[in-house]
Image: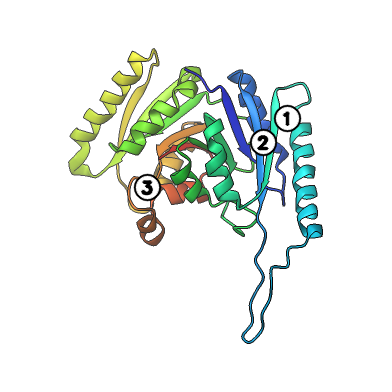
Amino acid sequence: MSYATLMVYVKVDHVSKQLIGVAAGLADTFSAKLIGLSALAIIPPCAAEGVVIVDNATEFDIAKMKATLAEAGKTFRAAAGADRQAEWRSAIEFPTQTLISEARCADLILIEKGKSGDIHRSIDAGAAILGAGRPFLVVPAAVKALAADHVVIGWKDTREARRAVKDALPFLHQAKRVTVVEVCKKDEMDIARHHAVDVVRYLAQHKIKAESRVEIQAQGSGADQIITLAEDEGVDLMVTGAYGHSRLNEWIFGGMTRDLLTSSPICCLMSH
């Protein structure tokens, strides 16, 4: 099993050559096709009381948006390398919906870590992960390359975590070390050990050697705990399920997915 096609979402307002470089490097690793994607949506007119305003998106405005997308495409192709199999796609449409739709073409989608911005010019990462039906690799801005030598699986016995492990198999086959970590309450240690060992056995059936580790949940964010563990161990890729419960609850009460999306300095592969 491998990734045959990688897709990288490119922000037109700040085309990240580093992100494209990470994507290109992984395309080489997996002998995969690389697709660059970006989108811009027309901003609707504002209405004032007692004033009727018609759609003011002129042909000039649309032509300018197309030119902006084309320029991003040129930068993508240059950063990806002229000698590789790369494709550029763009649309005059909402970025998040465009990415969800175009996800049908990809095995893995790369996005840059960061907060969501203007919905007309940037993606909502959470909505994209929930709607795309594909695994996402969230790449921090400081990352220049991803070897995935040491991979940590942040395990929780949920549908999403199982999906993430399956989706990460190409990386896990490449890794020199794989650690399955479950963070749990003190009275859940025995069942957590059982779960983690089961995952290790599952990976062994795929010819992947892994080790298990169970940590007692500390005060504060679970994401902070696993990030600290990963940094201490020299981990360069974390694998987790995304939004194992209501996304609304995560954003109101705090949750692992939200915190990893906004705080992790380490690349995260997430699946829903």
Q: CA distance from mark 3 to mark 1?
A: 36 Å
- Callout 1: SS: helix
Colour scheme employed for the rendering of this structure: rainbow
> Could you tell me which quadrant the C terminus lies in?
top left
Q: Nearer the viewer, residue 18 or 82?
A: 82
Circle 1 packing at 10 Å, graded few (<14), some (14-19), many (20+), is many
Callout in the foreground (2, 1): 2
Compare marks 2 and 3 and give the one earlier in the sequence. Answer: 2
Q: Would you say the residues marked 3 and 1 are in contact, meaning their CB atoms lie under 8 Å apart?
A: no
Compare marks 2 and 1 and give the one earlier in the sequence. Answer: 2
Residue 144 visible from this viewpoint: no
Q: Which residue is mark 3?
A: 222
Tell me: 196 left or right of 80: left
Label at residue 80: 1
58 shown above or below 220:
below
Residue 168 visible from this viewpoint: yes
Q: Which amino acid lies under the numbered mark 1 shown in the image of this protein?
A: Ala
Circle 2 packing at 10 Å, graded few (<14), some (14-19), many (20+), is many
Name the residue at 66% across, 80% down.
52
Q: Would you say the residues marked 2 and 1 are in contact, meaning their CB atoms lie under 8 Å apart?
A: yes
Q: Which amino acid lies under the numbered mark 2 shown in the image of this protein?
A: Gly
Label at residue 268: none
Tell me: 45 left or right of 200: right
Name the residue at 51% across, 51% down.
262
Looking at the picture, how far across and down is residue 261, in whole percent? 50, 47
57 shown above or below 172:
below
Q: Which amino acid lies under the numbered mark 3 shown in the image of this protein?
A: Gly
Q: Nearer the viewer, residue 216 or 148?
A: 148
Looking at the picture, how far across and down is residue 127, in whole percent? 48, 50
Name the residue at 37% across, 20% down.
210
Label at residue 36: 2
- Callout 2: SS: strand
